[in-house]
Image: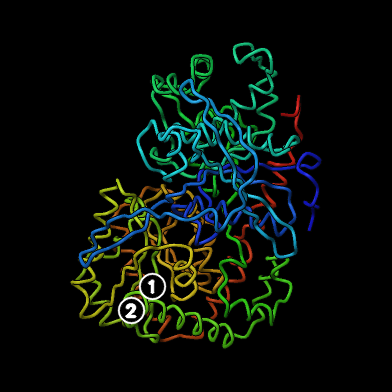
Amino acid sequence: MIWNSSQKPSDSFTVAFFSMEFGIDPAISTYSGGLGILAGDNVRAAADLGLPMAGVTLLHRKGYFRQHLDSCGNQSEIEATWSPEALLERLPVRVLVPIAGRQVQVQAWRYLVRGQFGDTVPIYFLDTDLLENSPWDRSLSGHLYGGDASYRLCQEIVLGLGGVAMLRALGYRKVQAYHMNEGHSALAVIALLEEQCWGRGLSAATNEDREAVRQHCVFTTHTPLRAGHDEFPLSLVLEMLGEERTNFLMGTQCCPNGSLNMTNLALDFSRYINGVSMRHEKVSRTVFSNYPIDAVTNGVHATTWTSPPFQRLYDRYIPGWRRDNQYLRYSVSIPLEDIWQAHIEAKQEMIQEVERRTGARLDPKVMTFGFARRAAPYKRSDLIFRDLERLRQIAREAGPFQILFGGKAHPRDTWGKDIIRHIFQAGESLKDVIPVVYLEEYDMVLAKYLVSGVDVWLNTPHKPLEASGTSGMKAALNGVPSLSILDGWWIEGYIEGVTGWSIGEEWQSESNPEKDSLFLYDKLEHVVLPTFYQRPSNFASMMRSAIAFNGSFFTAQRMLSQYLQNAYLHPANGTRP
């Protein structure tokens, strides 16, 4: 441990980590995908290291949604309502947040993330569901990524302005860094600037005031897709934030084309900005060319995503791996037969879970591919089904295989829903030769089974839209190699024939679906399947290498250490917010 986090908030160095979603507990449905899971892994790593950190988010009483898929793959959604009273601690503190000229009361609930060595990190869930608020205001802590632009802006006001106010009410006075995980919390910089200009107003803010705030703000962008960068019409901003704040925002670089761009606001007021892989850094520099952008490649929390069979294996051969994940490099000394046996155990547990959920009986001796991510068009989860006849030929001539899918489409993403239906249709067409199973309600629990139990992790995003991706990192911790398009983290993680295989030969050009599918089929037929069936010792060696090279490096422990050295400990100038 490098910090003592037992001190009171007001007495300690603290990092405030703002995120619209947190994936911290399967029973707390306040995450939709990788952004929230990454936030959860970040605070887990902080708790392990004893780093004084506080997470800030919204309560989302109705969660994201529960997914149901009918026999044709049509997705329907129901509310993912959960009970904070059973899982969180309600704090006796309230703050007021001005929205549209009225004062909205906000309370906080606390969840303590417990590290492996006794330290804890609190996450504060902001809640507006109070009798003193109007029905509309009470609903703001209801749905994650729900409602219209007005609803979303009001949520982001509560997260940004309300988050800073709540930290102050809870005694956090010396915050070294405010880390904005995407732009949803960007209005926190307005709260900080108002503190800096106390008694003078935003209109009197000087360049020195802005720089004082900037010295304490860190921003991580997670996607080059426009849909990931919230924009709100200035007319709506004026209605919700009032004249003084709107006039200030209009005088910055954050309001192009008559809209407030939350990403631009975060960029403009952050002293450290990063993408989430080396490739994403380069892509982000072309999108946001006026800003210096660094790279901190994502990582996953090793003990959370390592399956029980592999945890037992590592405890036996590498007892220090939990304290220092880099010790997983020493997995090169683990006998291949022990690696394979741990994998067989994890695979059998996954197969049993799949049967329990779906009734489908998979063959444990057949090569199994996994693809489980949000059903978003750019992720192209159905790319493998571009030529069904070629797939039949490969299965008959190179060896049998089966494919497991999982992932939710956003309720308003018709293209994402079409992809799920297409996978169901392809599976029906291939059922005589290739078992295809799409598992509904993909969540943290199901993810742990899949990333540890499949034989190869498949990933086929459209280049260069994959900012990072972390599912393959989770698979690597369990000795599962990846077969992936060269984009995001995989550019850094792949060693051909050692940690997995690439789909295509270079990463610089944009994807061509026809060429990508041909590369995929050729690699399946001539390399992947023959290695699994004809050279099992080579395959087991690849599993071991995936752990040693990728499992040891792509961890939240390493990621947080990079943030600590490059962002959080950066010398701050001016007045401390």
Q: Residues within 10 Å of mark 1 (few under 14, many from 20)?
A: many
Side (left or right) of 113 relative to 395: right
In the image, residue 498 sits, relative to residue 3, either above or below, namely below
Query: Alpha-carbon distance for marks 1 and 2?
Result: 7 Å
In the image, residue 91 sits, relative to residue 264, either above or below, namely below
Q: Quadrant of the C terminus?
A: top right
Residue plotted at (51% across, 31% down): 157
Residue at the outermost front position? 131
Side (left or right) of 14 relative to 62: right
Residue 3, x across and y down, in percent: 79, 52
Q: Amino acid at mark 2?
A: Phe
Residue plotted at (64% across, 15% down): 205
Labelled pair 1, 2 in contact (Cβ < 8 Å): yes
Of callouts 1 and 2, the N-terminal one: 1
For the residue labelled by badge 2, is the local secondary structure a helix, a strand or a loop? strand
Q: Residues within 10 Å of mark 2 (few under 14, many from 20)?
A: many
363 and 308: which is toward the camera: 308
Q: Any mark on residue 369, and which? A: 1
For the residue labelled by badge 1, is the local secondary structure a helix, a strand or a loop? strand
Residue 306, x across and y down, in percent: 57, 71
The residue wearing badge 2 is: 401
Residue 174, x across and y down, in percent: 76, 36
Location of residue 548 (image quadrant): bottom right
Q: Quadrant of the N terminus?
A: bottom right
Residue 510, x across and y down, in percent: 37, 47
In the image, residue 218 sits, relative to residue 528, either above or below, namely above
Side (left or right) of 348 relative to 473: left
